[in-house]
Image: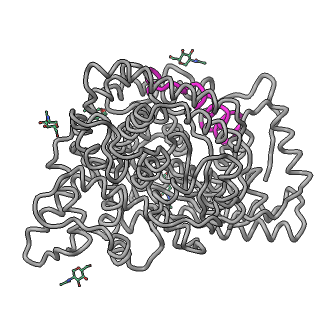
Amino acid sequence: MAVLSEFSVLSAIMWISCLLFLPLVAGSINSRLLDSILVNLDEDSSACGHYYNHSCGKYNEHHNNGTYFHFNQMLDLQVKQKFVKLMENLHKNSQSPGFNESSVEAKVLRFYTICSASPRNISSLEQYLQLAPPGEGLTWPQFTPSDSKWPQKPFNWLETLGYLHRYGLTNVFLSLEVEPNPLKGSEFRLDLRKPNFEEKSQKLNSFVETLTMLYLMKVPPNEVIPLARKIRNLEESINELVMGIEYIDGELISIEELEKRTGIKFHRLLEQFLGQDVGPGFQVVAQQFEYFSSLKKLMEKQEDHVVASYIMTRFGMYLLEETTVGTESTKANIHEINNIFEKLRNEFLLQVEHNRLELSPRQKRFIVRKAQEVILNIGNIPRADDFRNFASHYYEGLEFPPGPLDYHREHLKLLQFRTQKRVSQIQQRTQIREEYFHLPDPTTAEASFAYYVSYLNIIIVPLGLLQEPFFAPDSDDVFKYSLMGFSLAQLFMNAFDTDGITVDSYGIQQGFKSERFDEALRCMYRNEIEDVDDSLSDNFGLMITYNAYLKNNKNSTHTDFTHLPPEKIFFLNFGQSFCENSKYIFNSEKDQERLQQIVKGFEPFNKAFGCRRDGPQQEKCQVW
Ligand SMILES: *[C@@H]1O[C@H](CO)[C@@H](O)[C@H](O)[C@H]1NC(C)=O
Ligand SMILES: *[C@@H]1O[C@H](CO)[C@@H](O)[C@H](O)[C@H]1NC(C)=O
Ligand SMILES: *[C@@H]1O[C@H](CO)[C@@H](O)[C@H](O)[C@H]1NC(C)=O
Ligand SMILES: *[C@@H]1O[C@H](CO)[C@@H](O)[C@H](O)[C@H]1NC(C)=O
Ligand SMILES: *[C@@H]1O[C@H](CO)[C@@H](O)[C@H](O)[C@H]1NC(C)=O
């Protein structure tokens, strides 16, 4: 089993999926990275004017074949390609006599084989629904034999929801999630609130789409149109209830009290979901009680088959969306990234040492300590000594029996397994920061965005970023600092933005008061900066990255692979992550404006491109 790295195995099994394969390009690393930047460049548009138009002006021309529209989506696609390659290697390995049939690698391969052999088409929804009925002893309405009535036994929408929550469904009629305690990030609880209708995956969308879903789920053709109207009306009524309700802080409340205040028998939902009895003292965090009281009245007026069909349609949509990705990683990557991160951290500590904010010794100690405690989790895996062992242990409860298997059944089993892992966080009393990793969420898994977990002071760098053109361990530092470095610095600064600065590494409020910090914020408001925290992490992040790069590259006026000065490459590569095909991306103006804000008035940028600084200068808001 020497061919596969431990990381590959672990990541593969965590983000199992069926994917396509396309070959990768060859060439020398630095020139390859440089070329990938230069093709996007529009030389006719001045870097000193609209920087996005300069650095990304030709992105549309070169990335227009419909596979992806944004830099990060391109990385996602590459991840999938590598994943498939990995599976091919694993398959070859499995043919050798020493292959351990009960190892975690065997499990990965088994699932992958089942899923690639299965016809991936949306008509298979019917099979899922047969396997996942609305409850024990129940079927979905359209599968009732013509000589009997639906339901055969009483239908209860709360029980059905609880039952489907086991597969990871949520946000239908209500949102029930396992969430960290915001006041103590090491604790997890069940969080109950109104549903959300903002994203495409959170509602029915167009009428045609609803008709298609019902048709795919084998609702009799003559019932499709009237049923579509009814379930859309139901969703509209829920949406109306939701609209008037404000977000408020949740309160820890017992089930007994919650049922008294809302009239909804939530224990039926929870017992189905958790698969165990829930006593009256069981606690959840709940909010928006008036929503639930109105929901109760609304649900009393509904016909069961409409409610069941609505839940079923949303479940079907969830199953169609449920695709995620995985990739491999190497020790060289991890070593290099940690190395850069330490340089950035030092640069920040140096600034704190200068104490521009005139912090008291106690405040300074707090900031220094928090900075030193930031954990970098590369690849979203727990910091265990033996990853293979960890993976074997983690997937102990997941078995794919020998013989021919039904993909739909095994897929549902995997979804259930993930939900159980999530729920088990509640029982696990305290979270050890070093062991933290984010349980992949089937509907929101993002392969190629790094993020900061504020309640535990951890930066997660997903596997999708450990690849070209985002990161190559053996490339020139100018590439490594300007993309990966900047990303890390930005996230690191989240620990010290207006929220971050008030809490410690476990998300516990510590309070923070600094007249100079407040003055810097007022300065930003005077400049009409929309998002102060973004601006803070963008600008300061760029500064520490650039300084760290200069300090660690004595010969920063010259590279051996191009005549272009390194400072220019630095800013071009940095700009690249903002590139997107604006014909397809709805929100592009905002990102372009953000890029513009970052480079505007940054002296090293002006110097690199020879931009003159005439005209009125914007007030410079320095924080740290
Ligand atoms: C940037 O490019 C877009 C698209 O070509 C164009 O519409 C816009 O006017 C340009 N902006 C500036 C400031 O040059
Ligand atoms: C789309 O374009 C990119 C970049 O030019 C290329 O790498 C990729 O292979 C293309 N995909 C298809 C399906 O042609
Ligand atoms: C095969 O893998 C299982 C599970 O990881 C392990 O318990 C067992 O010892 C392995 N067998 C051999 C021969 O390595
Ligand atoms: C689609 O799936 C159905 C049910 O699984 C199967 O009967 C059918 O042959 C599949 N169609 C294609 C084109 O693969
Ligand atoms: C720095 O770059 C110059 C070329 O401009 C080269 O001659 C010199 O060897 C480099 N120095 C180091 C330490 O790499």
Number of labels in the image equals 0
- Residue stretch rendered in magenta on the structure: 580-608
Residue occupying image coordinates x 77% and y 57%: 501
390 left or right, relative to 48: left
Residue 76 x, y percent position in the rendering: 37, 44
Q: In which quarter of the image is ligand 3?
A: bottom left
5 left or right, relative to 443: left
Residue 599 on the magenta segment: yes
Q: Nearer the viewer, residue 323 or 283?
A: 283
287 left or right, relative to 27: right
Q: In which quarter of the image is residue 594?
A: top right
Q: In which quarter of the image is residue 391?
A: bottom left
Q: Which of 133 and 388 is in front in this view?
A: 133
Residue 158 x, y percent position in the rendering: 50, 47
Q: Quadrant of residue 595?
A: top right
Residue occupying image coordinates x 74% and y 64%: 350
Q: Nearer the viewer, residue 28 or 385?
A: 385
Residue 262 x, y percent position in the rendering: 67, 46
537 lies above or below 308: below
278 lies above or below 218: below
Q: Can residue 339 be seen in this view?
A: no
Q: Which of 211 and 301 is in front in this view?
A: 301
Residue 327 x, y percent position in the rendering: 33, 56
Q: Can residue 165 be seen in this view?
A: yes
- Colour scheme of the picture: one colour
For the N terminus, which image quadrant?
bottom left
- Examine the residues drawn in magenta and state their main secondary structure: helix
Residue occupying image coordinates x 22% and y 42%: 22
